[in-house]
Image: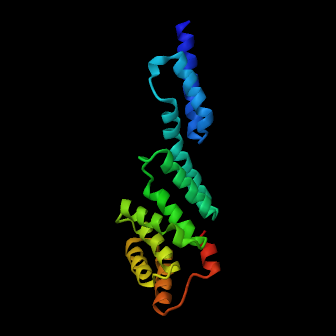
Amino acid sequence: SLCGVEASATVLLLQGEELALDGKIDEAIPKFEKALELDPSLEFDPQAKAIKMAAPFFVSEGMGLADQGKVDEALASYNKAQELDPKLEISANSWNELCWYGSLYNQADKVMFACEKAIELTPDHGGRIDSRGLARALTGNIKGAIEDFEVFIAWTDNETKKAQRQGWVDALKKGENPFTTEVLESLR
């Protein structure tokens, strides 16, 4: 029956979408192709659909990898997402995550671009500026780091973080490095 065919096309389409959202492009495409075969009125390009739907998965995967300190793998995931869908808009939050954790795992030089992208997307967000401050401090841009931390201190209502950042600013102004291994580990 026609209803049965449409139903199975819908099921295949949903299965394909679920696979694509999990980054399983090669498994999603055949489901989409079969759905189209059953219901040509669907009219879409199976490969393009699978790729576009999968791209955000790789950003999420990259964020998870960054949190674990796997910075090179995280960067590769973000790159893969952008290669799959060049129009993909990666959020300020996703860029900030890469910036912050990349810095906490001593790879600030590799993620500075992500700090800048986060701020470009949300120029007034003190939290993003704070993350860049950490990256700047760890890459030797002390003046820039102090400026960023001072913006964050004025922006945040969190008294604990305010006091902590003020301590960093005071240390940096004295030419000291407040970012001991212990401090970086405590922020992860």
Q: Position of residue 19 (x, y in %)?
A: 60, 35
Q: Is residue 122 visible?
A: no
| Total count of labels | 0
| Horizontal arrangement in the rendering, residue 157 relative to residue 100 (left or right) | left
Residue at position x 64%, y 73% from top? 185
User: Residue 97 versus residue 78: which sits nearer the camera?
Assistant: 78
Q: Looking at the image, which residue sits at the far left?
A: 124
Residue at position x 59%, y 61% from top? 66
Q: Looking at the image, which residue sits at the far bottom?
A: 174
User: Residue 86 versus residue 106: which sits nearer the camera?
Assistant: 86
Q: Position of residue 36 (x, y in %)?
A: 52, 21
User: Residue 89 versus residue 29: which sits nearer the camera?
Assistant: 29
Q: Position of residue 79 (x, y in %)?
A: 52, 54
Classify 184 as above or below 82.
below
**Quadrant placement of the N terminus:** top right
The picture quadrant where one finds residue 119 is bottom left
Q: Is residue 33 visible?
A: yes
Residue at position x 49%, y 49% from top? 83
Classify 83 as above or below 150.
above
Q: Position of residue 78 (x, y in %)?
A: 53, 54
Residue at position x 57%, y 53% from top? 77
The picture quadrant where one finds residue 183 is bottom right
**Quadrant placement of the C terminus:** bottom right
- Indicate the colouring scheme: rainbow
Classify 33 as above or below 6.
below
